[in-house]
Image (cartoon, rainbow, N blue to C red):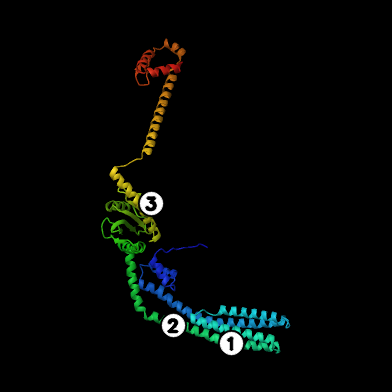
Amino acid sequence: MEQHTLVLCNKRIYDYYQKNPSINIETMNLILLDFMEKLSTDMTSLLQNTFQGQVMNEVKELRQQLSHFQGSMITQVQKSNDDFIEKTRLVFSVSSSENKEYLSQQLQRNTETFMDKLQLFIPKGNEEMNRKIQEQLSLVQKSLQEDLQAYVTKSDAPLGDFISLLDTKLSSIQQPLFSLIQANQEHLSTKLSTVKEEMTVSKNTTDKLYTDLSEHFNKYKISSQFKGACSEKDLEEVLVELFTEDKIENTSGKTGKGDFHLVRNEVSYIMFETKSYRSNVDTEEVTKFVNDTKETRLHSIMMSQYTGIVGKKNFTIEINEYGNIMIYLHQVHFCPDKIKMAVNIIDNLAPRMKVITEEEETNGILIDKDVLNRINNEVALFLDRKNKLKDLLKEQCKTSCAHVDTLELPDLGLFLKDKYPEKKHKMYCHCGYGCDNKKQLSNHQRTKHPKAKAEEDEVSA
């Protein structure tokens, strides 16, 4: 079966349900969902149908169940009595009268089993009523054990007569127990009647309450400004609970200041920005947050309570040119642990960023000598490898040109020389200079590129 889990991080909600254990969290949320999903309908009639109607139906069902339970319980107790009498008769019939110790043990075990069954049928009322019922059950058990033990050790009466007397006495000693249970049932029935009357009397009050709730949730549904105000109020409560030694300043009404400032030692320290959108926080909001951080020169935390933030991963950490730390939080749900973790990150990074920023402002960017030497060696190695690669490419080009120049067809040239006038083609040096023949090319290379010419001659050899 699929499992579902919901974690509550809001201390106010937690404290409320801890103080009111009789209120079921799931039931209250289902009621809330009923009218939240139908906000466009008449809220008064909707809530009356879901809340008052549910309570009235449950009262009616409970009264019916009480009546049915009382009759069912009497039937079950009577059946248990019959089973107890029959098993007692069976114990006497199959046990030897001479082994009285064994017989007593079997009878005691049968009595304890009988009393355990009675415990299952007895309703659990208030504490005082439970105490009285348990006292009466103890008396029933004690009386049965005394009668059975007395018959085992002393009585010479026929077994049939003893069983008949035991059955009669069992019904007699159970009467006070039935009276207590009936009194408890009547007490519950009276309370249910009182609840019904109070529900009827408070109808006008609840109608007004439902009307107010309707206005509240319709406003929440329509107004993004109102939703933002609610989100800010919830966040403020969390921040006040978390940072008891710091001042929490509400700056939501100030342009470019975020929603809250955490003021430590009389100095603004961290800016908080909260968003409660149905979709991911867009890049325009992120840009505004970055600009606000620059303007305030504060470390900053942007949190999206129910969605993500476009272009930022959860717990992304950024540092601007002024050394201000910016942290982005996704799906916070006003969870104190997530907010506290982000503030702890700033508390640990901020002192180091302050030292680095102050040193750069005073002395510029300083690089350790060993680091600088390693960088210099790395650059030198890079340049050396670059030059070697360049030389290698040139060498390959020269060698290729030399081999191309050796490609000739002398016999074909002689054959065509008499029939077609010879068409001269210019010959070019690798530097781009054109020559009419090999001799000119050789002279050019010898005077302009003596080293390259010597290497070419060596390759040709």
Residue 423 seen in the current view: no
Q: Residues within 10 Å of mark 3 (few under 14, many from 20)?
A: few
> Label 1: which residue?
173
User: Would residue 123 appear left or right of 32 to someone viewing this image?
Assistant: right
- For the residues bearing labels 2 and 1, Cβ distance under 8 angstroms: no
- The disc, 2 or 1, on the residue closer to the chain's N-terminal end is 1
Q: Residue 356, position in %: x, y?
A: 33, 47
**Rendered image: mark on residue 193:** 2
Residue occupying image coordinates x 56% and y 87%: 175
Tell me if residue 76 comes above or below residue 271 in the rendering.
Answer: below
- The disc, 1 or 3, on the residue closer to the chain's N-terminal end is 1
Residue occupying image coordinates x 37% and y 81%: 201
**Which amino acid type is marked by label 2?**
Ser
Q: Residues within 10 Å of mark 1 (few under 14, many from 20)?
A: some
Residue closer to the observer: 7 or 339: 339
Residue closer to the observer: 218 or 148: 148
> Label 3: which residue?
316
Could you tell me how far apart the alpha carbons at marks 1 and 3 are, in whole angstroms? 75 Å
Mark 3 or 2: the one toward you: 3
Secondary structure beneath dot 1 equals helix
Tell me if residue 317 comes above or below residue 148 in the rendering.
Answer: above
**Which amino acid type is marked by label 3?**
Thr
Could you tell me how far apart the alpha carbons at marks 2 and 1 are, in whole angstroms? 32 Å
Where residue 174 sits, quadrant-wise, is bottom right
Q: Residue 406, position in %: x, y?
A: 44, 17
